[in-house]
Structure formats: C-alpha cells, structure tokens
Amino acid sequence: MAEEQQIEITNDAIADVEQDYSKNPVLAPYHRTMEEIEAMPVIEKTQTVCPECKLIITGTIYKDGDNVMIRKYCPEHKWTVEKYWEDYDMYMKMRRYNYFGRGFENPNYISETNGANCPFDCGMCSRHKSHTGLANVVVTNRCHLSCWYCFFYAKEGEPIYEPTLEEIRHIFLNLRNQKPIPANAIQITGGEPTLHPRIVEIVKMAKEVGFDQIQLNTTGITIANDPELAVKFRHAGVSTLYMSFDGVSRRANPKNHWEIPATLDALRKAGLNAVLVPTVIRGINEHELGDMVNFAINNSDVVRAVNFQPVSLVGRMPSRQRENQRISIPGAIKLIEEQTHGVIKKDDWFSVPYVGGINRFIEALTGEYKYDLSIHFACGAGAYIFIDSDNKIVPLTRFVDAAGLIEHLQRAVDEMEGKSKLAKRAIAVKTLIGIRKFIDKKNQPKSVNFAKLLMSIFLKHDFSSMGKLQMKSIFLGMMHFQDEYTYDIHRVEKCDIHYAMPDGEVLPFCTFNVFPEVYRDKVQKQYSIPVKEWESSHPGWTYSSDKYKRNVKEIEATPAYMKTYGEMVDYFALPVNGGKSVNSFVNETFAQSVTVPVATSGGMVQEQKAAMPSHAPQTEHAAPTPAQSPQPSHIDASGTGMAFEGAEFSAHEEAGCSCGCGDADSSLGDMDNGLGGGCSCGGHH
Amino acid sequence: MERIDEIITEFNKRATARKNEPGTENYNWSVEENGTKYVLPYKTIKRVLFSNISQKELIDIPHSARLQYRLMLLEPVIKATVNYVKGTILVIYNNTGSGNQKEKMSRDEIVEFLGTQSVHVDPAAVNERDYDYYSEFFKYTFEPQRVRETAPYGIKMEEWKRIRPEYEAKTEEQFAKKMESFHEWQGEYATEHPDILKEYAAAAAAAPAKKGGLFGGKKKSKASAGGGHWFHGL
C-alpha cells in the first residue's frame, strides 16, 4: 500500500491541501485518502480499464455516503477514483431490474478468445448480452457546426467519410439480418446527416428495408432553413427528429437556440415529432434541466421526449476539470427534482431494463420475440409525465405501482413456461385482471385510462399502443454513456445502442466511442475519401463552406422565435403544480426588435403572454388563466448579469465568428476550449 | 505511456510513408455482389499467426488484451487477437507490396513491435498466408453465421423449434402488410402536401381510390399513421 499511496506533487495536489473538500459534497468523494476509500463498503466488483494504458483491471464499486463510486488500481498508473452514480438508494433500487438478454445468434465477428479480451475483441462477439435496440448509422462525418466538445466531425485536413447509397443499404440490411431479433429502430447520424446530399433517399431506403422507427440525429438547423425538408423526411419515413438541445437560454445552448423555434414550426407543419437531446455538463447547463422539461411541455404538441445525456468525458482530461464537470444519471435526476420543486421526484424514475418485464410477458404470451431492453441498469433511466386537462403534471409512478406490476408480470412469465397455449391464455387472463390493483385510479390523470391502455398493449401484443400513451405524455429519459474513467465492462457487454460500421462490424456505443482509435476512427478512415480526392470530386468545396453562419438579429426578429421564447408558460408555477417557478424560467423580452411587424412586437407579445400559446396542446390542456400565468421575468437566464442583446450577437458575428454559435461571451463557464477562439464553441475564427 | 505512444507513432510514420508506394497509383478495387458494387480498401493482404508465445511474456489475460489493443493502434493492422491461453498472436495486416493506397507494414516490423513489448516470436512457429479481405472478412461480417439458437421467453426450445417456421412466415406476412399500409399512408400524406411532394401526389391521385382502410376496415387516422412509436432512443 505504501507504494500505491505515493502522491505526485502537482498544482492539483497543492490545491487539495489549500482547499477543504470535505465541505463540498460534489468534490469530497474524490479527495479522500486511500485508507478512507478502502474502508468504504463495497457494493460489487467489475472489470474496467486503466484510462491511461487501457490495461483491463478490476473495478471496485463502493458506497461513499450518498454516492456510488468506482476505484481502480493500475500497477503502472496507480489509482483512479471516479463517480459512478450519485445516489446509493437509487442505485440499489435500479439494480433490482438487471437481467441478461439474449445477444446475437449470428454475431458479426468471431473472436477466437470468445470475448476474453473484451472490450478489444469487439465486432460484435458472441459474448455480448443484448441484441441491437437502437442502431446508429453514420452517413457522413461532415458537420455544419464545430462544437468544442464534439469529437465526431471531420476537422480541417481529415478525410471525408460519406458512404454511398449502396453501401448504406448494405449496412441497413446487415442490421435487419440480425438474429433472433432484427434491429428495428435506427438512428441516422453523422456529423450532421442532413449534409448528405441524398439524405431523403437514405431515409426512404431505411423504411423499405423494414425499420419501424427511424430517428434523424440532427441539430435541426437545416430544417429550420428549409422547412419543406421536414415534409420530405416525414413522407420518406422519419419517425422522430433526435435533436440536440442543450438548454433553453442562448448561453446554455449556443448550438441551435436560435433555430429551434423554426425547426419546431416546420415539424408541426409536417406532422413530425422531436426528441430533445441535452448533453448535461455540470457548470455549463445543469441549472436549466427543469426549464428544459418546461420547454418540452410548452411544445408538447411536437416534442415527445427529452433524453438527457450526462456528459461522457471521453479523452484524457485533467482530473480537476473532470471532477467539476462530472454528472451522473441520479445527479441530473436530483437536479430536476430540485429545479421543479418536487413535481418530478427522483422516485418517479425507473431503470430501462424495467421495461423488459413487460416485454417478457408479451413474449411468453404470444410466443413471438419482442424487443428486449436488457441494458445495464446504470446506463439509462426514464420517467413518464402526463399533462392533465387542468395542466397538472402527473408522473406515471404517482398512480402506478411500477415495481409491483413488474413482479406480477414476471410471476406470470415463470408460470407460463412449458404450458400449453390454452393454459398460457388462462394465466394471462388471470394476470391481466390482476393488473388493476397496481393502478391507483384516484390519482390517475383525468385524461388517461391507464388500465385500458395497458390492456390494449397486452391484447394487441405489440407496443404500438404505447404510441398513444406518448400522445398524452412526455417521456423523460436519461442515457449516460461511459468514458475511460467510469468504464464498466459489465455495462458494455449489455449495451443495446449499437453502431453499424462500413466493414460489417457492429459495436456497442461505448466501445465505438470510448476507443475510437481502434474502432470508430480506424475503420472510418479505412473507408474514407482523402481530402484531395474529395475536393476534386466536389469542386468549390472546403471545410468552411460546410459551416453554418447565422444572422442572430434577423432570427430574433422572427415571429416563431418571439413566440417560442417569449410566450412560454411556467407550468411548474401554476397553483395546480405547487405554484413555484421552475429554476431559470424566463421569457425573453424583445424591446430591441423594432424592425418586426407591429403584430409581433414586444407589446403584443406581452399581451399574448396572458393567453395560452397557440402552439400549446389546446385540445387536452386548459389554458392557464391570466392569474395563473407567471409574469415574464426580465432576469438574465444565465444568472451572470450578462445582457443578451441582439446587437451584441450581431457584433460577434461581424467580428468574424464563422462557427454559427452566436455566443458573445468569451469565457463561458470558464471553459477554455484550447483552440484560442473567443467564443465557447471552438469554431474557427 | 509516453514511451508506447512514441513507439506507435514511429511505426505508424513508417506505415504512412508506404501508403502510395510504387505500383499503387491505379488501385481501385471493388467487388460486385448481386449487381451492387462495393469499393473496398484492401484486396489481398496477409494473415500471420505466431504460435508458441511464452505465457510468461504475455503475463496474463489483461496484459494480452492490452497487447491486442496496442497492435490495433498500428494503422496497417486490421484485426489482432492475442490468445493468452493458447499462447498465440494472430494479426491480419496490410502488408508492404499489397498494392493498395493504405498504410502498410512488413511482418518483420510486427515482430519488431512485439519485441518492444517484450514478446519474442519463435521463428519456427510463424505461419503466414495471403488473406482475402473480401471473402474472409467483409463477406462474413455482412453475412454472419448462426452460432446458437435461443427461444422466446416462456417457451421451451423443443416447442420453439416446432413453431419457428410458423413464426417466420407470420413475420414476413406482417412485414408485407406493414409496408402496404405505409405506402397507402404515403399517398395520403403526399396529397396533403402537393406542392412539396408533387411527384408522389400525382401518383397517389392516379391510383384507384380504396374504400376504407387497407383491408376494408376503418381508415387509419392520420395522426397515428407511421408515427407515435414509443421508443425514443433509450
């Protein structure tokens, strides 16, 4: 132990001495002595990697107060201590639903070692425990933005990966050929997939080969500027836009804050829906989580879900920066509880493999394979919230005994095994009748008959009925991808979000992205086109010609922008929801917008604030009365006192920022992007 | 760590310098499968198997896995497998003289690299042969064989083997119905957006009108057709 406890004298070590971390609940678990850490109660052991040399080592998952931590020791690089899960009780609760799925009957890669060298035997091998739940297919590595935290687009000088239509079809067919359960949900991604010149045809092709759920992972910017594209996408078969959305305010979401209103409008007209996807980073946008939920409720006619993704700190990173930015699923969940004043509590969330209980029941009943969400419990969590006719926000768990229901169904699955068809049906009838006792009708939203909905799911034997549930609710999801510090091989071998590569291999998300040097980048490079060749086949093309430039002043004067950000209702501030304003809630003011038509001027917006926003779901939600509607606040959302005036943003644009971020602040969150740029996005200046 | 980074960089520099070695200027390899052309980065490359590797040098499975990772960091290495139990190292790599325009290395360089990792190769236990990238790798990954069979939950394997053909036929039938329904919805949707989807709208208008839905029942509502799936990326 003496050797293991040697401390390198670094600036961080000096700072440790100077600062008393015991008073900081976020940082304290990182700053204990090894004696203290080793005395903590151990929950379980796993296999992990050394973040420095990638040696496979044992990871010990232990309890440190309310936190669940992971510690690992590499003989060469000593100790790594990292936060794994920020709530011990929740960890133990979620852990109950863990189960092993079936993996592949026809794995794409035969590993001679049968996966003993996991995660470096990947391709994917026979050791893997889950089938593909969501398949990601990269159709280009070009992007119109240059976000500082993104590792997934071609930078200056890097080769272009943009497979042909035939190659993409080949990848799609590979996914559909998986056994026993073919991939049925696909996410077309990039780079920015809408930069692929044949993107509509790609979507069409995905539908024709049989994918039911087609998501387009996009910033939405292309659609904002070409709304007709949304109609073409919908017609071709896109089910959902999986759209980046890092916050409501400009400061938290420099990526697409300005374009979101026009994108949502285009989706409305096309009859498409969106999932908002915030990447959650402590110190950057974690104060707006509740506000993002409120934004989704305000746009629930078109927004079906918010899928929060706590940041994955991929790549080598100074420990101080890592400790400050790290946030895990329960960390984000607790912030939502705090920011919504308990309207959405941490107990309202369930782990993703929980849904497996419902699938297993339907499968046992019908004798047909169903989607098996057998991912690791620490990878994802979800909550359904219903917006009732009186605007009351009701999480599903307030009227459904979720744990009891799953145990009830699992008992039926066990009972059905080996029984005749008739006997299975008798068990099913008994089970379905028994479901009612798990539903509390008194607390159920008035607009929902959950027992009937469940019956319809079970009797129809598929999940299309869940679509109807979605129409009356918003799904809140959490998906925490791993990095080298938190890496847990037990998690990766159960992953069901997979990438299909051009060489035919299929990889779990957290192998593909955590070890890009041997998977993602390596294989994409093999199938990429060298820049010179790309330039000669695309005359006039340059890296910067792909980059998007926005006119902030012009966008902020549009009716869509003013309506979206100026007429939001704070649903959490309504008396029916407890009457406390959601954290960071603010409606924009548009005093600067002198050039816009009178009908949409600032004064008119103020008047309209007393009424229900026209795009809010009027059929199911009663309009808040003027008394209920919170008064618009003029407080700066960022809390920094920094004024976000159109003129300042324009000045930023005029100063030569070509990144499209529109950010006027050069020191956002004290994040030095290391690129020498003044703005936060790391774009080229 | 810095040392291994330097070693890898050095080997990759050498490999990159050989990218466009003489004779590669006109490389343009593709295969045709069912009338579709696939451009492949490699044609004939090499597969080398080093046997009789001392387990003492491989240390243990975790160190073997790390050696495998380090071999894969070499750009010309397409796949590597270090089997601690059998004491073998298998490397599929883009060899010098392979004629393509990718990074290349020689077998001697692989041996040299293993030497830097304190792993010594027995010259008498080296088995190298040509490796057809298309037929041995690419074709397999796109058409993998079944290595096991699992039954749905609640069903025993014997029962599953009996009902499986029925299940497969039903799945195909459901797919056909689903597509038919989707195409019908597409026609309706195109007529709602005639300016944007001109060509489809015209085709839908020309198609004979159907009574009710696809199977004569109640017409599917526009709101639920083709959308509303519950699965949102988790």
Image: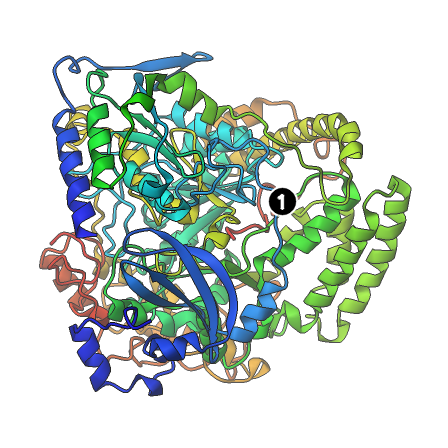
Drawn side of residue A178 relative to residue A72, left or right? right
Drawn side of residue B139 relative to residue A461, left or right? left
Q: Nearer the viewer, residue A75 or A246?
A: A75
Please name the colour scheme applied to the rendered image. Answer: rainbow
Residue found at the very far left of the displayed protein: A655
Q: Is residue A283 visible?
A: no
Where residue B15 appears, as percent x and y from the top left, is 17, 29
User: Residue at horizontal 24%, vertical 79%?
Assistant: A640
Drawn side of residue B212 relative to residue A254, left or right? right
- Tag 1 residue: A371
Q: Is residue B217 visible?
A: yes
Q: Using a 10 Å C-alpha cutoff, classify the residue at mark 1 as few (fewer than 14 neighbours), some (14 to 19) or many (20 or more).
A: many
Q: Nearer the viewer, residue B172 or B46?
A: B46
Q: Is residue A13 above or below residue A593?
A: below
Where residue A678 appears, as percent x and y from the top left, is 13, 63
The quarter of the displayed image where residue A682 is located:
bottom left
Q: Nearer the viewer, residue A498 or B181?
A: A498
The quarter of the displayed image where residue A8 is located:
bottom left
Looking at the rendered structure, the number of numbered marks drawn on it comes to 1
- Does dot 1 land on a helix, a strand or a loop? loop
Where residue B35 appears, as percent x and y from the top left, is 44, 11
Which of the chains bears the disc numbered 1? A
The quarter of the displayed image where residue B76 is located:
top left
Q: Is residue A306 above or below residue A509?
A: below
Drawn side of residue B42 relative to residue A539, left or right? right
Q: Is residue A408 above or below residue A27?
A: above
The amino acid type, in three-letter code, at marker 1 is Tyr
User: Residue at horizontal 53%, vertical 58%?
Assistant: A301
Where residue A685 appears, as percent x and y from the top left, is 11, 54
